[in-house]
Image (spheres, rainbow, N blue to C red):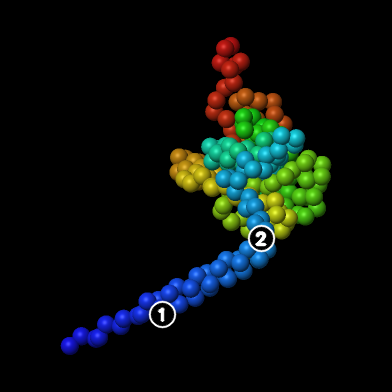
Amino acid sequence: PGQPAVRLSSALLRQLREVLLSLASGLANLAHALPQPTLLPVPTASSSSSRRSPDKPVKIFIDGVFDLTHFGHMNAFRQARAQGDYLIVGVNGDDSVFECKGSRPVLTDSERFSAVLACRFVDEALPATPYVMTEDYIEMLVNDYGVDYFVHGDDPCLVDGRDVYEAARKAGRFVTIPRTEGISTTDIVGRLLLCTKEHHKDLVPGTPTSPSASTPTFASRQSQYLVTSQLMK
């Protein structure tokens, strides 16, 4: 035999309904009495439009080594530029890179700086910037250059176990952008090494394009191409 059905009287149902309505009304009054929460804006690409002001352009700063400048760097500039109205790019200096990474870039300071400045997404470039963003340097960029936000890829950037952009994060001025997959300076160097068996062994006094150069150079860095003026002779 099944369990006997429980039947509630109409009077009991009315009482239960009134209790529930009273409870719901009390909870609603309590919710309205609580203070409204303060929502802090999260600096992401989706909120970049809300940071724009008609009176002051939003200035974005992104920095890096940008060695053997490639389309991954250009894509980072494009994404960073989209976060505001004006993009300033800091090109890390050779000495700072060597101190933090233990090796110097393939391209010189001036070569990397010129390549970055040629990108159409870049409004301004700063040479020889430090690899690690200190609070003093961030303060200088904010006060002297009017930087509003600091941008970097979403991949970790650590030196001695510490986040390079720790100071920018603490200041509430840090924004991440997606890293471009499948391309890096390290990968390009690896491809080049697979293309040749030559090594940096012998020094030569000059190059085909500059035979009078007094500073010797590695044979592997000796250009095998002639400039246009020489080809026309």
What distance separates the C-alpha of mark 2 from that of mark 1?
A: 38 Å
Disc 1 residue crowd, few under 14, some 14–19, many 20+, Cα 10 Å: few
Q: Nearer the viewer, residue 7 or 82?
A: 7
| Residue at image coords 47%, 40% | 196
- Mark 2 crowdedness (10 Å alpha carbons): few <14, some 14-19, many ≥20: few
Q: Secondary structure at mark 2?
A: loop
Q: Quadrant of residue 206?
A: top right
141 relative to 42 in the view: left or right:
right
Query: Is residue 209 found left or right of 17 in the rendered image?
Result: right
At 56% from the left and 53% from the top, the residue drawn is 155
Instruction: Using the rendered view, name the quadrant where residue 135 is placed.
Output: bottom right
Q: Nearer the viewer, residue 128 or 44?
A: 44
SS at mark 1 in the image: helix
Residue carrying label 1: 12
Callout 2 amino acid: Gln
Q: Residue furthest front?
A: 11
